[in-house]
Image (cartoon, rainbow, N blue to C red):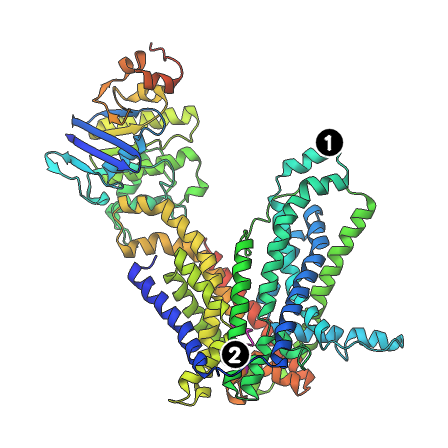
Amino acid sequence: MAPRSLSIITGTLLCSFVIVPLLAVWRHADASASLGPAEWAALRFTILQAFLSALLSCFLALPVARALSRTQFPGRRLVIKLMGAPFILPVIVAILGLLAVFGQNGWLNAALRSLEMGSFSIYGLHGVLLAHVFFNLPLATRLILLGWATIPQERFRLAQHLALTPSARFRLIEWPMLRVVLPSAFAVIFVICLSSFAVALTLGGGPKSTTLELAIYQAFRFELDFAKVALLGLIQLGLSLSAAILALRMAHEDQLGIGFDRPIDCEARSVIQKFHDTLAIFLALMFLGIPLLLVLANGLSNLSSLPVAVWMAALRSVLIALGATVLCLLLALCLLSRSGEVLATLGIAVSPLLLGTGLFLIARPFLNPFDISLIVTLCVNALMSLPFAVRILRPEMIKIVSNFSRLSLSLGFSYRSWVRWVVWPRLRRPLGFAAGLTAALSVGDLGVIALFGDAERATLPFKLYQLMGSYRTEQAAGCASLLLILSFSFFWIFDFWGRRNA
Amino acid sequence: MLNMLNLRLQQGAFNLLASVPNLSPKIYAVMGPSGAGKSTLLAALAGFVPVQSGTLSWQGIDITSWKPADRPMAMLFQDNNLFPHLTAERNIALAVTQHRTLTKSTRQKILTALMRVGLEGFGDYKPGQLSGGQQSRVALARVLLQDKPIVLLDEPFNALGPALKNDMLDLLQILAHERKSLVLMVTHNPEDALRIAHETLLVSDEQVSLPVSTPDLLANPPPALATYLGKRVTVQ
């Protein structure tokens, strides 16, 4: 859409925005610095938890996806839609919900205590895994479900026709699909979990369960040891780049894909199969739904008694989210080419914390870097959503050009008319969707702000983190429901705007 | 008069030479085997595909390098002739204006055009709410408003059923006759050609033939066309 020169300028800006901070950190890297035992442990833990999270998510998603693919019930489409919700759910809110179930004073421990069976601690590796499975089980379910939807209906009919046994059916029809889909789902989740920060920050910690991202944060915030930040950041960069390349080679489907609308034949199932399917869907819904319902139940009544500081933080978060959305979409519109898509993906491979550190180091000689913490957060948030925005917009743009450019040429459209009569109305829907995702992701992000945040410059997620840290449970619950409402309203409003009149 | 003087089209291994002088305001069918370059020829005439060499002229004026919108041609494609997000009225209006507000005279012209194609009262419908035949009519109404002396048709009625298609062809014939338009119509269906085009340009063996009488051509097709048609067409 954008003229070529503008694309090149944007691409260059984007590259320098990523590379210059990297260089700034690199300059502080100490040649003599080497990996100590703590760094090795962080690296090992990062890989271990990502591997286990991906494995568990895929393993648990399998029965859920299978059940959803062959069960018809009212609300099935809604359930599938809800499976997409964790993507925009603020991590810190989900953690508060999980704490309400699995935490020290949660349901699980209350039950265990009443049965006098000891207690369960959510902190450590299993807590991190729990949270990662919470976020990625739905993603894996959707990816696998999409795989099921790509199997032609005729094959299932043929299987019934030939009276294939369940095992033969699995071997001949379903396994070939799973063999392709499962590794790519695993790879995607593995990459996502590699750069886990907020989960590790709240549920991990301690030398035994520190991820690289968390180690970067600690080296910056508590030690101001830039050589260490640089070293850790470069390891993280290498790790996530190689994993991302691996995932890109394996990923063959659009992860944000649609196409669940196809009606599915209901095959004859045995009573046991029906029971299994119902149980799988029920358990998944409980696991995903209860923590969020608890957040709302505990928090909504506290909304009115929230202190002014929380509302100020909310205001900051809203402004940052709006700014990040505008910036992200402007960048995305200038990068709707193949190379643009690659560039946009590169931005996400660099750890936000590393970027933040780099920008801090650049700004330090000139001004108090904490003064620009909100701007930095805005920019990093825009960058984080950029690959998604480009992936959402580009296919539609390609379609617009291939379908309507000749007609527009023959009508003698000027650039302005082309945008006004063709591109804008056709692109509005994906624009709304992309804006919704960006705003929701941005408003709930607890990343780079954790580096710079303080009481006067807190965003809402950071404020929530502080409230949780100081055990102000009621305020934290109110704050979490506010954040939850904000992020989902953002998504809903933008998406609705895009769909209106479409 | 439309003159193609040694027009050479080239795209990779594809080659086509068109040298057809003095096409007068009539309906010509463009026929030939698949892949011979019928659509490419039309796209080149409309200015979407650059020509390698040669001259295209209209009424003695060289238009070889004119932009598509400046050429004396309106074109209907195989599909995507309408913007699905705009109403029929707005789609037609884009032939004359790109402003948001329509003047009274423009509105009147659109109403007349809609009436002419038998779609009175359908101005506020979007293409998705119209049948395939009605969509073709809206596109034709826009061509009317574009008011160009040459109309290029790249099988736009292909997706219609036989009866609807014949209706559209008849309507096209009436309109073309009234306005003395020069129509070039790509078709792979001999009945369509016989129905409205007295003369046909045959595209085969990397060449565009001079206009030949359609009944004669179909009664006695050259080998390339005979293979393509599969059987001889009987002409009553």
Residue tagged by mark 1? A162
Position in image of residue A480 (x %, y %): 63, 77
Residue B221 in view in this figure: yes
Choose the circle earlier in sequence order: 1 or 2: 1
Label 1 vs label 2: CA separation?
60 Å
Boundaries of the magenta span = A442-450
In this view, the mark in front (1 or 2): 2
Image quarter where the N terminus of chain B lies is top left
Which of A346/A469 is in front?
A346
Query: Secondary structure under badge 2?
Result: helix
Q: Residues within 10 Å of mark 2 (few under 14, many from 20)?
A: many
- Disc 2 target residue: A231
Q: Position of residue A292 (x, y in %)?
A: 68, 69
Picture quadrant where residue B152 is located: top left
Q: Image quarter for residue A135? A: bottom right
Based on the picture, tell me whether residue A140 belongs to the magenta stretch: no
